[in-house]
């Protein structure tokens, strides 16, 4: 113990902490130089308070934002507390990484939407987008959980958010594809980025050979706090960027899909597990796969059956992935995936991209009426004559590129491939960067152990108080006579 | 151990898991045949996006829906984690059962409101109603917690939701009674249905004689997550079906009632418990009784004192029920009630029905003005002449049946009796159905034990890793030197 | 054990429980005499349902209220579960105290805003204000956690809410200062009031010398539920009393400030802790200091950099407080502060007051345009001529007192001093009152121990069941073979 504690400062020295300071100061300088309040949060002369308030409340992000906010910090944070001795790090590092990256995401988003006068505008909608962006590095963190220093996670997240912003810009603005719930841009991207980093970090051959890589009875229940909050608010996540009937449809589709994946994950878990019991890993994760799988097409006219079918498929696929694919990937590709993000975010994200392309390929003016051109802007006519006719009935349609359904589907697939390519390549490079000594590293022995990051209570007092140690053991074994 | 594990497949075989698959597929087929998106979630030609959005946002279910959603899965789920060795099942089976039943509830609700063209419409309001419906079987589950297979819970829930829908239809549309917070239709119904099933399941004579039927120190804290979230969002639950001043009144009345029941439950717990300490069972449950007791009359003009009084009474009644009534019911009626749903949902639900009848009996045009006829539609005049006069001031009143206050009160009582009768009879029948071998069963020995449903980590590795077992023991006893 | 249990009734007798009863009945009588539904929750003749609903929904408290509701009971409640053997009391007593005090706060708020006809009106906005008021005594409770009877907490809260209401009235209506997030009126007030009470209660010289005053591995994770929910919804808390762009700005400023304080708290924790690891106490508390520090100025034009800077400063200051100041205060001032509320609410609250004064001192018509007079009503011109001109552009401005920026800043500082003075003096007096025997007291031996308040399961059965005791031990050590 004493030996190990003595060795820790080598990789977690004061310079890591100072690096955190410097980082926050750099963020502050960038915020000061680049950002200002957006119009909804600014004082605008010559407009009465009441009026402006009315104008601004058309699309109220406060209806959705708190739910997404809970998903990111409580959802992802507690989902990762399943390890028996890494719960404090799971929730604590999600907290730290989330707090840094939400600022970085605001900067990235601001820079992309920068105005001519060089100002990046902060608004509630921007805060919501930043929360969604932060999900990507937290997903990558799931692949690496227990195997990194906090500084590695922080820098991975910063690089990832920059690449994420570029990839999303390519997808949304250049390829003009639809990904309402960000299943491609956040989930697939985050998963494959994280797996690529994990590949660079290397792994032993057998899965779960580390004695701390497993849950305890209590830690599995803590993780369910994360699972259930994620499950509950996934409809909010997938509908966050939409409005009107589009948003309501996304909520309904996501609820159906994630309910179906929950049931199918339980069923498949019982079939593939020993004695036909349920496995907590499957229940904590695969039940959510339907939320990912419907993401891209959440706002489309999938019909209830479409949403249920894709959710069911995702639930089955995800459990099968945990049971059979993850060990193979670890053994043959030497990629270790602590939380199994490949099964919750990777494969379901790809599935979402494929399903989105399919739905885009069958979308017609017949079923979508003119809102086809609001949902798929690239399909809008380029000729002003046709546009004028549409605008009689349905305003707010911009000129598009006359894409056919097939072309839109092809672009959707292209965006999926581009996302996977960029995620993997940038993940590999990021992995190499993170192995630089300045970020520190975790030895095999230190993996999955909170003692590496946290000044645990008993540790601090261990020498002076044999009495205290006894006290705390007793306190834990639930027998009040113990502390007479 | 080996012996018991070997015996489990007898009752939890692969066929249970396949049944789950089949069930989800049947749901899918019914959804595909019967349902479609409601108008708020559909694309409607010839209406601009902005306009339609405006029209639809009059009554925005997104203000209340997320809160109720949290109550059902986090609230009920964690409330039932209080058993020391059944926490994973409590939260896990709530999750599974909830995910199936929310789909079943959507179907039931859809079928009742089916259109002439044979379409059942899905909408946010429908999703909210489905969540509320799911509360009924989860309450019944509380009476049976730890004593059933998951398949028994699932089928109980399906039957219960069908009967629930019929009973609610009778109450709301035939008897035309008011039950804003569904205290009769959900709480009393769910409790007595569950108790009837539990009666059929049988019980030994002495309470809590099973060595696993009790909390641990940690499990009692997990349960408080459920309690507090239920307590916080109960005002949302009781006001979910209301709007305008009616909704605000329901929120205020519920907050007052549930606050009073919380204080009174603490006080009564201290009086009836050993050494005048508090008892966690009372605090986890009876503090919520005021939310149930005000439910029926939540939107009525109870005045603050009315809400506080009924909440106080419910708090006292509920604790007294736990302390004195539950053991008697177990001993003499041979009904075992794991969570004590009779004290949290049963008696307070009946109390709510009685209080609702009382409030209906004193409701007059003087205190309610014309909104009397919006709140109690059956009291509206049947003559068009009188109606026209009312509509000058207050539109949206339909022709009623000229009921007097006394008649309305009598109908309220009738609905309570009908609900109790239907719940008990259908519960008894359901209990008999659930004892069929196809659903499996739990032996006395397997009760309240997560090992029956879950592939627990240590179990899986127990033979090959004496080292792992040691690791996990140490990991749990909080002494870092332990894992030197 | 038997000896201690036998002694407990001396201080927790039946009379405490009866006092609770009486208290709730007194509250009921006051509610019955004083309060009625406000206009938004009342039936108003001659106004159609739809119309009135529209009018009322201008500022919808339901967008913010549920978030603040979660902060108070889940946030504060779980934050205080960090002690290894006081988790049930932390969450349970927060629940009890909150339920009583929310009613008391409604009465206090009602009495202050009482109408000429003697009616105090209940409304959603009032419920929201009551939640915020309850935060003050819960903060004070943090200083006293584990050292009081529940009756002491209840009476402390009642006295504190009365003084709080008076102090807030002085600040808002007499001194006309701005404190959007109530950092002075709730946080600084609650902290220094609690510390004053704690001073009267006395303390031994060395910190943490009680063997139960420390966390366990699990309790630290439970506490993080509180921390993260508080962190997530702090922007709602600080913007609860605002509207329009003012509200959006408060949300953005708070998010920036609390994110910066989170990062800085982690960095500072690593620098000041042994081996440069993180300390859970700092992470659970100091990460939130930015929410407090921006509170007063949350709606002002702080610019992003201002919010980030004040948050960063608060994060550093709070950790430094925990590490160096708290032990000194305990040793030299003999004030024991269980949760360290001085570091989370006290110093950051004072910082908020100073920052608010600074921002008020540089506020000009140039940067705020005419909304300067909405945000700082005392700065509005007193002459009707000038007002008429302003109202052309910006209605809803009332006549003010022609205060200059400097004068407003001075008044802000004065309000801070008044708040501190009133908090400390009233806290000292309250401490003396609470030492009266009628409230009971906790001996040194009983401190930080749930067994004092709770009828723990094992205690009740301890004699008759050596078998049960074994069962529960095994149930807890996570080895299923244990309960063969």
Image (cartoon, coloured by chain):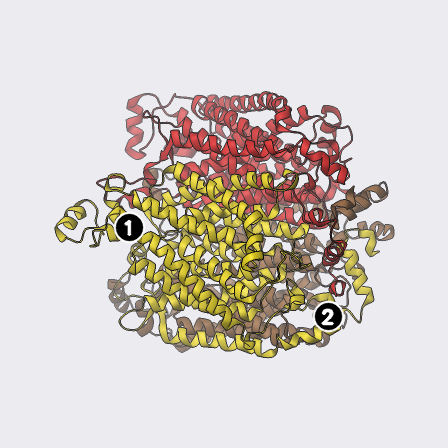
Chain colours: A red, B brown, C yellow
* Percent position of residue C256, x then y: 44, 40
Marked residue nearer the N-terminal end (2 or 1)? 1
Nearer the observer, C165 or B369: C165
Q: Which residue is mark 1?
A: C408
Q: Residues within 10 Å of mark 2 (few under 14, many from 20)?
A: few
**In the image, are marks 2 and 1 on the same chain?**
yes
* Percent position of residue C374, x then y: 26, 50
B19 relative position to B404: left or right: right
Q: Chain of mark 2?
A: C
In the picture, the quarter occupied by the N terminus of chain A is top right
Numbered label attached to residue A130? none
Q: CA distance from mark 2 to mark 1?
A: 61 Å
Which quadrant of the figure has residue B303?
A: bottom left
Nearer the observer, A433 or A257: A433
Nearer the observer, A393 or C222: C222
Residue at position x 34%, y 55% from top? Answer: C414
Residue at position x 70%, y 30% from top? Answer: A336
* Percent position of residue A62, x then y: 41, 45
Element under disc 2: helix
Numbered label attached to residue C460? 2
Residue C10 visible in the picture = yes
């Amino acid at each position: 113990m004493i030996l190990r504690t003595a060795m820790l400062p080598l990789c977690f020295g004061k310079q890591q902490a100072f690096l955190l300071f410097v980082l926050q100061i750099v963020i502050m300088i960038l915020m000061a130089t680049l950002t200002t309040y957006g119009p909804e949060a600014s004082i605008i002369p010559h407009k009465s308070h009441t009026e402006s308030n009315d104008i601004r409340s058309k699309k109220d992000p406060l209806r959705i934002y708190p739910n997404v906010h809970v998903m990111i910090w409580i959802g992802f944070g507690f989902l990762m507390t399943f390890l028996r001795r890494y719960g404090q790090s799971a929730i604590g590092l999600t907290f730290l990484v989330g707090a840094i990256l939400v600022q970085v995401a605001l900067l990235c988003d601001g820079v992309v939407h920068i105005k001519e006068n060089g100002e990046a505008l902060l608004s509630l909608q921007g805060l919501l987008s930043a929360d969604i962006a932060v999900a990507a590095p937290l997903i990558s963190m799931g692949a690496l959980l227990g195997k990194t220093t906090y500084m590695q996670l922080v820098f991975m997240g910063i690089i990832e958010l920059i690449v994420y912003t570029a990839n999303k810009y390519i997808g949304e603005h250049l390829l003009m594809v639809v990904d309402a719930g960000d299943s491609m841009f956040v989930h697939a991207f985050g998963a494959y980025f994280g797996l690529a980093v994990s590949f660079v970090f290397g792994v032993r051959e057998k899965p779960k050979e580390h004695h701390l890589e497993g849950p305890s009875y209590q830690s599995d229940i803590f993780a369910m706090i994360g699972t259930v909050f994620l499950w509950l608010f996934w409809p909010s996540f997938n509908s966050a960027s939409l409005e009107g009937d589009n948003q309501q449809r996304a909520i309904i589709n996501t609820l159906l899909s994630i309910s179906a994946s929950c049931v199918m994950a339980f069923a498949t878990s019982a079939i593939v597990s020993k004695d036909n019991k349920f496995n907590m890993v499957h229940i904590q994760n695969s039940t959510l796969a339907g939320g990912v799988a419907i993401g891209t097409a959440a706002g489309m006219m999938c019909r209830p059956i479409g949403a249920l079918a894709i959710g069911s498929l995702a639930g089955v696929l995800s459990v099968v992935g945990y049971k059979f694919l993850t060990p193979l990937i670890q053994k043959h590709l030497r990629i270790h995936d602590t939380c199994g993000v490949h099964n919750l975010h990777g494969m379901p994200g790809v599935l979402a991209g494929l399903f989105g392309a399919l739905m885009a390929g069958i979308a017609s003016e017949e079923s979508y009426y003119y809102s086809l051109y609001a949902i798929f802007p690239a399909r809008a006519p380029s000729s002003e004559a046709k546009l004028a006719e549409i605008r009689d009935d349905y305003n707010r349609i911009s000129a598009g590129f006359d894409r056919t359904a097939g072309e839109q589907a092809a672009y959707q697939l292209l965006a999926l491939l581009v996302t996977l390519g960029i995620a993997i390549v940038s993940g590999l490079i990021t992995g190499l960067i993170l192995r630089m000594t300045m970020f520190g590293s975790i030895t095999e022995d230190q993996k999955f152990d909170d003692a590496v990051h946290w000044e645990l209570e008993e540790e601090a007092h261990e020498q002076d108080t044999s009495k205290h140690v006894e006290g705390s053991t007793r306190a834990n074994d639930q027998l009040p006579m113990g502390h007479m």
